[in-house]
Amino acid sequence: MASDMPEHEARAGMNDSEHHARLSSPHAIEAHAPRRRRIVAACTAVLVLASVLAVGLSSFASATEDVLEETKHELQEAKDKFRAETRKIRALQRVMNRLATRISRAEQEILRIETRLDKLQRQMTKLQVRAALLQAKLDERSREAYMSGGVPILYVLTATSAADAASRMSFLSELNRRDAVLAGKVKETTDRVAQIEAEVVRGGQIVELKKRSLEMDREELQRKMVQSRRLATKLSGRIEQIQIEISLLRPLAVCPVDGPHAIADSFGDPRPEPGGGFHWHQGDDITAAMGTPILAPFDGVASVSHSALGGLGVYVQGEHGYVYNAHLSLLGTLGEVEAGDVVGYVGSTGHSSGPHDHFEWHPEDGPAVDPYEYLMLVCGVPL
């Protein structure tokens, strides 16, 4: 008989024996079998899923660890490579700076010797003219003596008295003395000309040797610059980042020469002037290829300059002083500029022996100070 009572209430109305019998009957066992199978299947599925999840999580963790280790390894390799390349560039920069300093001083030494040789050449020309005039005068006296033959003796013998003869002999002795002095002057002048000629020859040989050595240094510097350019290309992104960080420093925010360069530590060196004399070098020379951009090293105002010594130049007046760049080939932006703006291009105008930027730094608009260490902060590779 069917009943709408819930199963647990129906079970509650049975006695224990009836309930036991119902559970023990074949139909009851058959009814509960699928339920047990479902429970077992469910448990098995849970165990299998847990096992799969455990294996999956383990594999995922292992893969993540592998990727992390690989990334760390790549990062370390990148750092090692960067350090190695930076050391190479830093070493190259030191070599190039030494070469640039040696080239700068060799150029000034050659100029000094050539100025000295020009002076000696002019002196020798004057002495040669003087020697020729003295020799002509001596030759004229010799011709007069030759043409007169024995006349000097007759000149004495025809004296009207002993006093007249003595006077005539004294006159002839004075003529002979003057001829001897003239001959001595001719010899002295000729010897001095020969001495100067020898000095000019020796000076020319020294200049030739120095020029050969200078050319070798220039070629070596060019090779180092090419090598530095190749290395720097690999690190351009990092170098730009470093330059941005360095740009926050004072007094110079960026390197004034935008390209491969070499800085001569030449502040305070004596420099000969075209018209003679010398002056103390008021800056450092930054050697670079013709046409390399020259940048404003800080925010300020750029203005043009012209002089016989510096050629075409540009001033950049900033908050803490001004800089002066000389020997430019062309001007860039004038007026208000920001750090990194192109204000000119490397050249060799004025009194210059080759393309370079003569760079001066005048803090607080006062006298020039040695800018080498400041340039190293923005033009060299930082430690």
Image: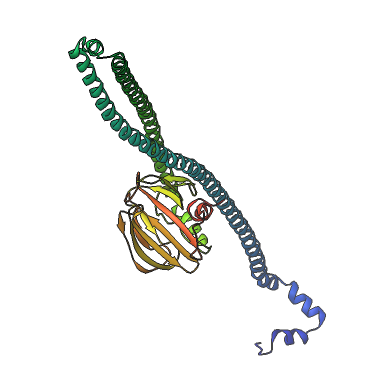
Q: Left or right? Give the position of 312 relative to 80.
A: left
> Which residue is located at x 58 percent, y 54 percent?
68
How many labels, in total?
0
> Which residue is located at x 44 percent, y 60 percent?
323
Q: Which residue is the extreme one toward the front?
A: 161
Q: Which residue is the extreme one toward the left?
A: 147
Q: Position of residue 347 (x, y in %)?
A: 33, 51
Q: Position of residue 304 (x, y in %)?
A: 34, 63
Quadrant of the snapshot with the N terminus: bottom right
> Which residue is located at x 51 percent, y 66 percent?
364
Q: Left or right? Give the position of 169 relative to 272.
A: left
Q: Left or right? Give the position of 119 relative to 285.
A: left
Can the viewer see residue 223?
no
* Residue nearest the viewer, comparing 178 with 324: 178
Q: Position of residue 173 (x, y in %)?
A: 32, 17
Q: Is residue 82 above or below residue 114?
A: below
